[in-house]
Image (cartoon, rainbow, N blue to C red):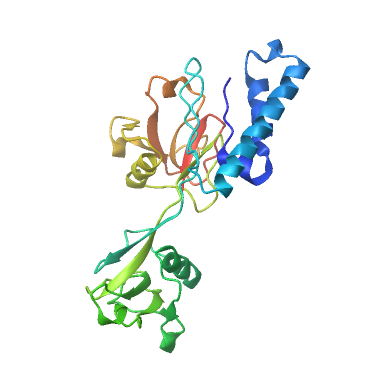
């Protein structure tokens, strides 16, 4: 039976039950199932969703993927990553991992164990400066302000700012996830081969094969493929023999014809 109950769907609105029903109907073996058997399958799905919800409530580890029957194919659906914040002393965040809002900056600080944040008073917490890293920043770890808890936070809106070595910057790793048969939400596409590979690794694919043999050759412009980083959909046989190829579609007007998996951030 192909298809998978995604954790996020179960936890939010029980859509996992519908996903299971659709998976059963999509299966070539569904005609062997009677109505009572389908009803039982629905109850099982509800039980799975309830169990997953209880895991979340009690802080138990959440599943990141569910493997299908080996006889069908290796499941290639992945749950979204947890949000990950980190800080760097004396450097800038990697491109695309800057935190450019005060709300995001506050969330990062709290996630890193700082419950009380003081904003830079003279600017309301927002500045534009060339010698400070873009995004959420404060003083470096060896600054005396950490000893007396007087470090102030701010967000530098200057995208070309460069850390002169005196500042700590807070960064956010992208929330990589995949969608089958659809495009990524607008603005969430991954448009470079470097980030495409990073997304694949973040979702557990350590070795990927590029369409055409290497990254630059994998870049295409096509209307029937989703914009950005893509490969074949989860039910494609290439997942079983690990031959799925990755590519980046630069065509912003591209539309997934239903045969592809898009990786998003």
Q: Is residue 86 above or below residue 33?
A: below
Relative to 16, is 108 above or below?
below
Identity of the residue furthest to the right in this view: 35
Quadrant housing residue 240: top left
Q: Quadrant of residue 136?
A: bottom left
From the image, which quarter does the N terminus lie in? top right
Q: Residue furthest front?
A: 58
Q: Position of residue 229 (x, y in %)?
A: 42, 41
Q: Left or right: where does residue 145 sit relative to residue 229?
A: left
- Residue located farthest toward the top when viewing the structure as drawn: 32
Is there any visible trace of residue 8 in the rendered image? Answer: no
Judge from the rendering whether residue 109 lies leftward or rightward of residue 50; answer left or right.
left
Is 44 in front, or is 165? 44
Residue occupying the point 36% across, 66% down:
170
> 3 or 59: which is nearer to us?
59
Q: Position of residue 63 (x, y in %)?
A: 49, 38
In the rendered image, the vertical position of residue 264 relative to residue 224, given as above or below: below
Nearer to me, 136 or 115: 115
Q: Is residue 25 visible?
A: yes
Q: Position of residue 209 (x, y in %)?
A: 32, 30
| Residue located at (63% from left, 14% from top) | 28
């Amino acid at each position: 039976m192909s298809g998978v109950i995604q954790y996020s769907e179960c936890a939010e609105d029980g859509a996992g039950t519908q996903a299971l029903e659709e998976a059963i109907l999509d299966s070539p073996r569904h005609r062997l199932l009677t109505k009572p058997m389908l009803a039982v399958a629905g109850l099982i799905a509800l039980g799975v969703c309830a169990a997953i919800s209880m895991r979340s409530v009690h802080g138990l580890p959440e599943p990141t993927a569910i493997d299908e029957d080996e006889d069908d194919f290796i499941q290639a659906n992945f749950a979204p990553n947890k949000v990950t914040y980190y800080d760097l002393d004396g450097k800038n965040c990697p491109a695309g991992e800057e935190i450019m809002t005060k709300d995001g900056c506050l969330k990062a600080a709290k996630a890193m164990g700082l419950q009380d944040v003081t904003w830079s008073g003279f600017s309301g917490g927002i500045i534009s400066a060339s010698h400070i890293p873009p995004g959420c920043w404060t003083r470096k770890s060896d600054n005396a302000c950490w000893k007396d808890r007087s470090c102030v936070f701010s967000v530098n809106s200057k995208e070309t700012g460069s850390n002169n070595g005196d500042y700590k910057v807070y960064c956010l790793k992208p929330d990589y996830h995949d969608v089958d048969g659809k495009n990524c939400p607008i603005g969430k596409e991954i448009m470079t081969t470097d980030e495409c590979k990073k997304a694949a690794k973040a979702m557990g694919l350590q070795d990927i094969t590029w369409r055409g043999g290497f990254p630059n050759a994998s870049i295409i412009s096509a209307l029937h493929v989703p914009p950005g980083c893509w490969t074949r959909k989860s039910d494609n046989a290439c997942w079983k023999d690990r031959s799925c190829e990755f590519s980046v579609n630069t065509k912003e007007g591209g539309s997934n014809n239903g045969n592809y998996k898009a990786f998003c951030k």
